[in-house]
Image (cartoon, grey):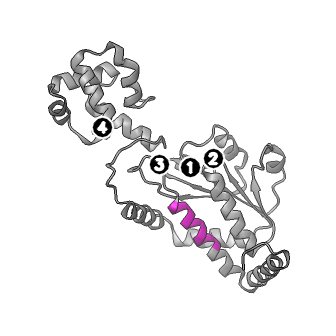
Amino acid sequence: MTTKQDVLSLIEKSYPDLSPSARSIANYLQQNPLAIVSQTSAEIADNTNTSKATVSRFFRQLGYDSHQGAKQAQLAIRESGVPIFTEGASLDQTSQELKNLALTFEGLSPEVLNEISQRLANASRVTLIGFRNAYPLALHFRQQLQQVRRMVRLLPQPGQTLAEDLHDILEGEVVVLLGFRRRTREFKQIVSVLEGKTTILITDPTGQVYNQQVSHVLVCHLGNESPFDSYAAPMSLVSMLCNRVYGYLGDTAGRRTQAISALYEKLDELEP
């Protein structure tokens, strides 16, 4: 069974070889891609004036065992992070975001969060690493932590390699690695290089494959119902961790934020 391409791509590729009735099904699915995962074979047959047998033959011609096989392959592709419709346009975004947040925080151990927050507060240095969609999250994480403690760096630097920086990890340093589905090919090599270091991995459920190689894994839920992933949950987790670090550092953090605010004013960097 083919799983590397989504159904619509396979329809386009196979279209010249389809029979007239199969082309009716192809036209319908191209115009209504959600039907692939939301309708039964009988419903697709009714909507295309064909038969269930014709629908079954259609999906076999695309390379699947059945319509159910095509549906599962489509859902698996979305699970990997590829933007594909799996729900209707009427999806309640608010309820979905709340669901992602609830799933994320329900799965996080208070004891682990306390340990991680203390490590981030007391580390000799904190290194944040993120690629692709994880990079802006890592950038925000760095910006928040830098408000309350010294020695916080972001990797990779634009246009730079990582080897020099990974080689120079300090005693007592904490590395926060952020990586969500559709991670870069080098991600697993970076995890391997960091084995034995204090590494916190913030990821989606697929990143749990690395849980034996890092110190802690914090799983965030991104949702599958919309074509694009939501990063509300990891952003909320970053906010929570930074607030906890502020709490652990207490007066030290307060004095630093005041000094930085004074510099903002002196340099006239922010709006009044």
Q: Which residues are magenta?
A: 232-242
Number of residues whose C-alpha sits closer than 10 Å to that of mark 4, classed few (under 14), some (14–19) or many (20 or more)? few
Task: Please tell me which of labels 3 and 1 falls first in the chain.
Answer: 1
Task: Please tell me which of labels 1 and 4 falls first in the chain.
Answer: 4
In terms of image quadrants, where is residue 9?
top left
> Which residue is the site of mark 4?
32
> Which residue is the site of mark 3?
228
Alpha carbon of mark 2 to alpha carbon of mark 4: how far? 30 Å
Question: Which mark lies nearer to you, 1 or 4?
Answer: 4
Q: Residue at x 30, y 37 (%)?
A: 32
Rendered location of residue 97, percent (x, y): 43, 62
Q: Magenta: predominant secondary structure element?
A: helix
- Whether label 3 touches label 2, CB < 8 Å: no
**Residue 165 is at least partly visible in this image:** yes
> Which residue is the site of mark 1?
180
Alpha carbon of mark 4 to alpha carbon of mark 3: how far? 18 Å
- Whether label 2 touches label 4, CB < 8 Å: no
- Whether label 2 touches label 1, CB < 8 Å: yes
Residue ranking furthest to the bottom: 251
> Which residue is the site of mark 2?
132
For the N terminus, which image quadrant? top left
- Whether label 4 touches label 3, CB < 8 Å: no
- Whether label 1 touches label 4, CB < 8 Å: no
Q: Residue at x 35, y 60 (%)?
A: 92
